[in-house]
Image (cartoon, helix red, strand yellow):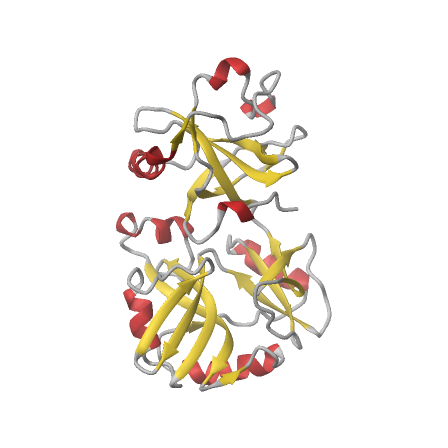
Amino acid sequence: MTARTVDTLPAGEEWSYEVKLDGYRALIIKDGDRIRIRSRNEKDLTSAYPAVARAATGLLASQVVLDGEIVAVDAGGRPSFQALQHRSAHPNHTVVFYAFDLVHEDGVDLTGEPLEGRRARLTRVLGDSGILRSIELPGTPQDVIAAVSGLGLEGVIAKQRASRYTPGERHSSWVKLKLDRQQEFVIGGYRPGPYGIDTLLVGYHGEGGLRFAGKVRAGFTPHLRREVFTRIAQLKATRCPFVDLPHPKAARWGGGVTSEQMAEMQWVTPVMVAQVRFVEWTSEGHLRHAAFLGLRTDKHASDVRREK
């Protein structure tokens, strides 16, 4: 079950609020002694996160399905998506699992139960396992936004207390407010540089096909440029995948790609997804001051749209 994006948080006693965590959404599936960690796109993440799998063995039920987020946190508990992506470069961060829902327990399907009931069961099931619980934030929407913004966190999730769990849907009973402008984009090409990549060219699926969103040059270290280049070099293609390139002239903030600049670019098959932070969308429909955060192996390129 996923949340719809909104511009303002809903208010009222029927709503509860949680921090929007910046990590990988995943399910923990426990069946006796067997533990599996599964991503949104059905990838097996168990071997990639052994500490999370070990913690899950301590859950206080024989059969469990938990929904939550894999997050890399620093000593103060602050999550970092880049640290999750590049753990060897961030040795002071710890990978943990924040559970926010319990959808199955010991043969009982809980998807039809209200959220508050599932949360009560969740607290008991977690015990002292080391799997963390995403807690409810007290106060009004304004209080919550002020607190989350003050900590520099990504956003807020609001959920109706009586909501049922509806797998595979963006439901209006769960909504998200992003305080930090970022989203996933499809990588369609790059400008070569000293470490393999100088600039990524990214877009989203819209009218007519893959539409160009902008150039992403900030957010890289030399090591990161080499690492991303290694991943996308094998995807080289001869044709531009963006349906709206070239542009007749360079856009403001350097967002466009002209006919002359097309020859500088190396195109790739648009199957890889990047997480990008940016200041705003320009009037030309391009990203202003975009910065690379990491690659997303848990998202399908075909699902990427421009978020409102």
- Above or below residue 49? Residue 179 is above
Residue at 43 percent across and 18 percent down: it is 264
**Residue 189 rendering spot, x and y as whole percentages:** 44, 30
Q: Is residue 272 left or right of residue 181?
A: left
Residue at 51 percent across and 52 percent down: it is 152
**Residue 225 rendering spot, x and y as whole percentages:** 33, 34
How many numbered discs, if any? 0
Specify the quadrant of the image occupied by residue 213.
top right
Q: Is residue 167 left or right of residue 261?
A: right
Q: Is residue 29 left or right of residue 169?
A: left
**60 or 180: which is nearer to us?**
60
Residue that extends furthest to the right in the rendered view of this protein: 12
**Residue 112 rendering spot, x and y as whole percentages:** 61, 79
- Above or below residue 280? Residue 54 is below
**Residue 145 rendering spot, x and y as whole percentages:** 62, 58
Residue at 66 percent across and 46 percent down: it is 308
- Above or below residue 17? Residue 264 is above
Q: Quadrant of the N terminus?
A: bottom right
Residue that extends furthest to the front in the rendered view of this protein: 238
